[in-house]
Amino acid sequence: MSGCSRSRAAADDILLYAFEQALEPDVPRYKEYHASLVEHAKQVCRSRPRCSDCVLKRAVPCSQALLAEA
């Protein structure tokens, strides 16, 4: 697993924890959140990531490195 992949996995855990703390336990809402996150990732997290367009870039540690490479 690359450093960026580990960073993304850590960011996923952080985002999940934040949403679980912010939202009431509600399975349909969690499913909606998950679907929205997947759709966002399809548009932004590609083989050539569009980190500058990402609304979550501050929560994804490797996005800064990817932005610097662009």
Image (cartoon, rainbow, N blue to C red):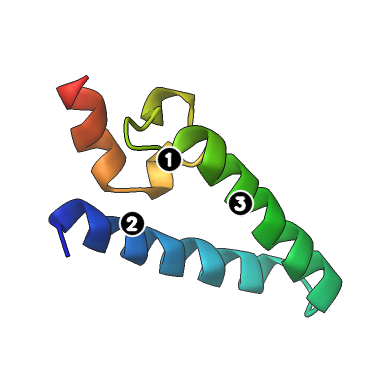
| Marks 3 and 2, how far apart at CA | 13 Å
x and y percent of residue 65 in the render?
19, 35
What residue is rendered at 23% in x and 33% in y? 66
Residue at x 36% of width, y 48% of height:
60
Given residues 26 and 22, the one toward you in this image is 26
Disc 3 packing (10 Å; few <14; some 14–19; many ≥20): few
Packing grade of label 2 (10 A; few <14, some 14-19, many >=20) is: some
Residue 37 shows which numbered tag?
Answer: 3
- First along the sequence among labels 3 and 1: 3
Q: Amino acid at mark 1?
A: Cys
Q: Secondary structure at mark 1?
A: loop
Q: Residue 8 — which label?
A: 2
Task: Look at 28% across and 48% down and name the residue there.
Answer: 61
The answer to whether 50 appears left or right of 43 in the picture is left
- On the image, the x and y values in percent for residue 70 come to 22, 19
Compared with residue 20, is residue 7 higher up or lower down, i.e. above or below? above
Q: Identify the mark nearer the N-term, 3 or 2.
A: 2
Answer yes or no: do the residues labelled 1 and 2 have beta carbons within 8 Å? yes
Q: Count the marks.
A: 3
Check contact, mark 3 vs mark 1: CB within 8 A: no
In the image, what residue occupies the spot 70% across and 56% down? 35
Q: Identity of the amino acid at label 2? A: Arg
Q: Which mark is residue 45?
A: 1
Question: What is the CA distance from the residue labelled 3 to the residue labelled 1?
Answer: 11 Å
Relative image position of residue 62 (x, y in whole percent): 25, 45
Label 2 SS: helix
Q: Residues within 10 Å of mark 1 (few under 14, many from 20)?
A: some
Q: Earlier in the sequence, mark 1 or mark 2?
A: 2
**How far across and down, in percent of the image, does residue 40 sit?**
59, 41
